[in-house]
Amino acid sequence: MRTAIIVGALGLIVFSHGADSDDQRTPQTHTVSIVDMRFQPEMLTVATGDTVVWVNNDLVPHTATSEARGFDSKTIGADKSWSYTVRGKGNIAYLCTFHPTMKATLRVK
């Protein structure tokens, strides 16, 4: 009887540990390059808690502004960058307010 209780307890510990490790994944940092009047990549898959860094490699200023107004970089000058830590889940469409044809999407899982 005592052995069965110990084995059962160990099984519970292993299960609990596995659940905790999924919840405690290390946040990642992703880079979006702004070059040739485009966001590259145009579709980026990230997880909640990850950080996205936009690096402006163009000669003119740009913004990274979510269409739902969830984030707004304001002006990102040439050779400058801006970062945002992702919150929530779903698709986040964003654009450059100076050049509205520049569009991209963050897919948050």
Image (spheres, rainbow, N blue to C red):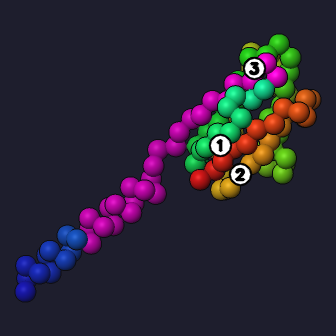
Q: Is residue 86 magenta?
A: no
Could you classify mark 2 by the number of other residues whose Cα lies within 10 Å: few (under 14), some (14-19), or many (20 or more)? some
Direction from residue 81 to residue 48 in the image, left or right: left
Label 3 vs label 2: CA separation? Answer: 22 Å
Task: Label 3: state its secondary structure.
Answer: strand
Q: Earlier in the sequence, mark 3 or mark 2?
A: 3
Q: Residue 34: horizontal and vertical position, in percent? A: 75, 24
Contact flag, marks 3 and 1 (Cβ < 8 Å): no
For label 3, count other residues whose C-alpha is less than 10 Å away and answer few (under 14), some (14-19) or many (20+): some
What's the magenta region? 12-37
Residue at the disc numbered 3: 35
- Reading the image, the residue beneath label 2 is 91
The N terminus sits in image quarter? bottom left
Is 32 situated above or below 79? below
Name the amino acid type tagged 1.
Thr
In whole angstroms, how far apart are the C-alphas of marks 1 and 2?
15 Å
Circles 1, 2 touching at the beta carbon (< 8 Å):
no
First along the sequence among labels 3 and 1: 3
Q: Amino acid at mark 3?
A: Val
Position of residue 35 measured from the top left corner of the image (x, y, whole percent): 75, 20
- Of the numbered discs in the image, which one, if any, rests on residue 85? 1
| Left or right: 12, with 67 as reference point | left
Tell me the mark number nearer the camera, choosing from 1 and 2. 2
> In the rendered image, which quarter is residue 57 located in?
top right
Q: x%, y% of residue 50?
A: 58, 43
Pointers 3 and 2 in contact (CB under 8 A)? no
